[in-house]
Image (cartoon, coloured by chain):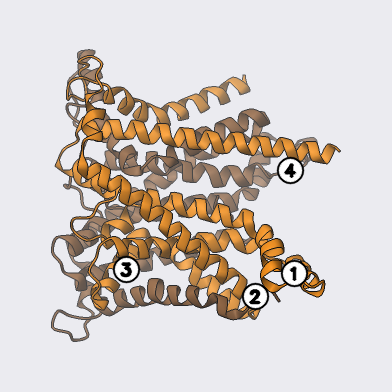
Chain colours: A orange, B brown
Amino acid sequence: MKKRAGKIYVLIVMLFLYLPILTLIVLSFNEVKSMSVWGGFSLKWYDELFHSRLMMGAIVNTFSIAILAALIATVVGTLAVLGMAAMKPRTQSALLGFNNIPMLNADIVTGIALMLFFLMVGVPRGYMTILFSHATFCIPYVILSVRPRVNRNTDRLYEAALDLGASERYAFRRIVLPELWPGITSGFLLSFTMSVDDFIITYFTRGAGINTISTLIYSEVKIGIRPSLFALSTIVFVVALAVLLVINVRKDKEDRADNALQAL
Amino acid sequence: MIAKKSYSIPFIIWIIAGTLVPLASIAYYGFTSRDGGFTFANVLAMFRSDHLQALGLSLLLAVISTVICLIIAFPMAMVLRESKYGKQGFLIFVIILPMWMNFLLRTMAWQVLLERQGVINALISAVGLPRQEMMNTPGAIVLGMVYDFLPFMILPIYNTVSKIDEHLIEAAYDLGAGKAKVYSKIIFPLSVPGIVSGITMVFIPALTTFVISNMLGGGKINLIGNIIEQEFTINSNWYLGSGLSLVMMVFIIASMLILQRFDKTGGANLI
């Protein structure tokens, strides 16, 4: 009885989470431009979406900014973690405190602050200011995911390698990097997704004439919802589903491999 | 030592240029008048009746949607904890998936559902009932907030709840505690860190949003986020916008401090 109540509860929450998305997916195949009348199956909104030069430009911007911002954040963040390891604990915690600010602050404040900064310095807002801002809010996530991987053991192994005649570069590549690698990759992926997902900070730090997917959606919704946005929703949903499935399957495999190793 | 301190230099420069100086510039503009002199007027402008009204409504709607999220999320986290492991992985997956969809698109979905010519009204009128005005109401905004932020409440609570030792709960039952007592003395206190980070992750975005209120409030309902956004994008009055932002930051910091007092373990894990 109790089990069934739980199942029904989960089902209701799932319906709440997914019915709106499902509605968008169904409407994206609707022949007529209506939110409530079904006019037959059609792919024309997908056609419109793929032929929209604005949308294609926004997609290129979104992903190029996400990759670059994640790369910059990963390099700056990882170096920062290594540098902090050589510092006094008090300096470290002070730096980590500053590091937390963009994560804890409301996005609107971060966005406005960066916008005012660009205005004061006199940098015209555009692609580069978005990139700078995205790297700013991504670096904290990289630091948080890489920092736990640095410990005394890494240091000892590194020194041992040096004592055994390895060059600094070789020891770094063979000892330190593999040790940090899981943190580095998850920091990169986290940064990438945060950047793709961001709207508010981009909205304040972009200039006129440059769009990411999010800012383009916002301006189009303001004018009036077109069904091509439903097509976009469907594509975004399917891509997210595929990516998450791949991640999950890979994690499953790794877990199983780990278990097998432990059994040996 | 692997590292030299100098490795941190790019990061320190980035903190100064990307975080500290920009925040200082909000403070600078917030206390400066249009002609360049020092003034409190921009900060005190929060007490203008329209601004106060927006701030009050923001606080109210943020509290309501946080409470609703909490009420939905806690039982959900408990169900997730009790369901079998493999299935758990699947259920977590199902909750994370919507978070990967752009939140503007998810908010737009509710616009499609609630519109006068929208899906829900079509169903209502098909049954023969009169169409309802659901858009551009505070209720629609709350619905949008709950929908967008619910996963951010479920995940941290699930994280702490799933780590509660089953033996503790069994021991409490063995010692004669009733269900209510087990919840109030064991499960609830142990899940406080998750609840606290869940509340932070819902309340602050809800308090400061201007997107959800713009899309589901049709520009007719102003939250404090809308007021600030309009000062920057439409009125180009950065001084007033910065002053109001400063006051809003006070509310953000205050709510964090209050929440931290409940979380005695300190630093709850976010996800």
Output the chain of dot 2: B
The first of marks 3 and 1 along the sequence is: 3
Per the rendering, the mark at residue B155 is none
Question: In terms of secondary structure, where does tag 2 sit?
Answer: loop
Amino acid type for the residue under numbered disc 1: Tyr
Q: CA distance from mark 2 to mark 1?
A: 11 Å
Q: Is residue B71 left or right of residue B241?
A: right
Task: Give the spatial CA distance, label 4 vs label 3.
Answer: 45 Å
For disc 1, the marked residue is A158
The residue under label 3 is which amino acid type? Leu
Observer-side mark, 3 or 1, equals: 1
Q: Which residue is mark 2?
A: B3
Query: What's under tag 4, amino acid-wise?
Result: Asp
Q: Position of residue B98 (x, y in %)?
A: 43, 37
Q: Nearer the viewer, mark 4 or mark 3?
A: 3
Give the position of the N terminus of chain A as an image quadrant. top right
